[in-house]
Image (spheres, grey):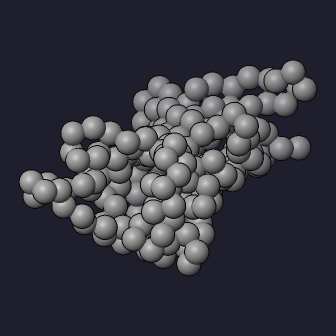
Amino acid sequence: MAITKWTVDPAHSDVQFKIKHLVISTITGSFKNFEGGATSDQTNFENAEIHFSLDVSSIDTNVEMRDTHLKSADFFDAEQFPHITFQSNYFHKVKGDNYKLAGLLTLKGVTKPIELDAEYGGSERDADGNIRVGFEVEGRLSRQEFGLNYMQLTDSGGMLIGEDVRLIANIQLVKQG
């Protein structure tokens, strides 16, 4: 079996998260700096190994004061835990272009299994002759399971921020070699 190595192209990829604020609207943020890759059979991505690392200090919600708070020990504690990492256990086709991606997510020093949905967007050769593939990855996690326990309440007794975090990543991989 021929092995193919792929690297994430950060210029054509993005990683976002969404969380409820005051339980009435959704705040969207992203991580600007990340890296990752995959190792696959030359002919397909079934059983591919996938790894990813996010730079916590690159968090961006378009509000500098909020970003500073998110980097603090109240949330991600970027000084002590500078990266969020993912290492796959399996990547299997479910139907058509849809896959299940499962692995271990490490966030704020806590490692837990997570299962994500991935949709294969296709393959194309770029202007320089490089082969590229695209995936859209989505999933949810409970922030408290990863030690993000900030629990400020509103005057009416509601939660300031929600428990569930939605992850959305649009990833373009470039074939190496």
Q: Which residue occupies the foreground of this view, 89 or 75? A: 75
The percent coordinates of residue 171 (x first, y second) are 61, 38
- Vertical placement of 71 versus 24: above or below? below
Q: Quadrant of residue 121?
A: top right
Q: Which residue occupies the foreground of this view, 58 or 45? A: 58
- Vertical placement of 170 versus 50: above or below? above
- Residue at the (28%, 46%) spot, across then down: 21
Total numbered badges shown on the rendered structure: 0
Residue 145 is at least partly visible in this image = no
Q: Quadrant of the C terminus?
A: top right
- Residue at the (34%, 47%) spot, across then down: 19
- Residue at the (79%, 39%) spot, across then down: 175
The percent coordinates of residue 45 (x first, y second) are 62, 41
The percent coordinates of residue 58 (x first, y second) are 61, 55
Horizontally, residue 5 falls left or right of residue 145, namely: right
- Vertical placement of 133 versus 18: above or below? above
Q: Which residue occupies the foreground of this view, 34 or 134? A: 34
The percent coordinates of residue 13 (x first, y second) are 64, 37
Q: Which residue occupies the foreground of this view, 62 or 112? A: 62
- Residue at the (47%, 26%) spot, across then down: 96
Residue 78 is at least partly visible in this image = yes
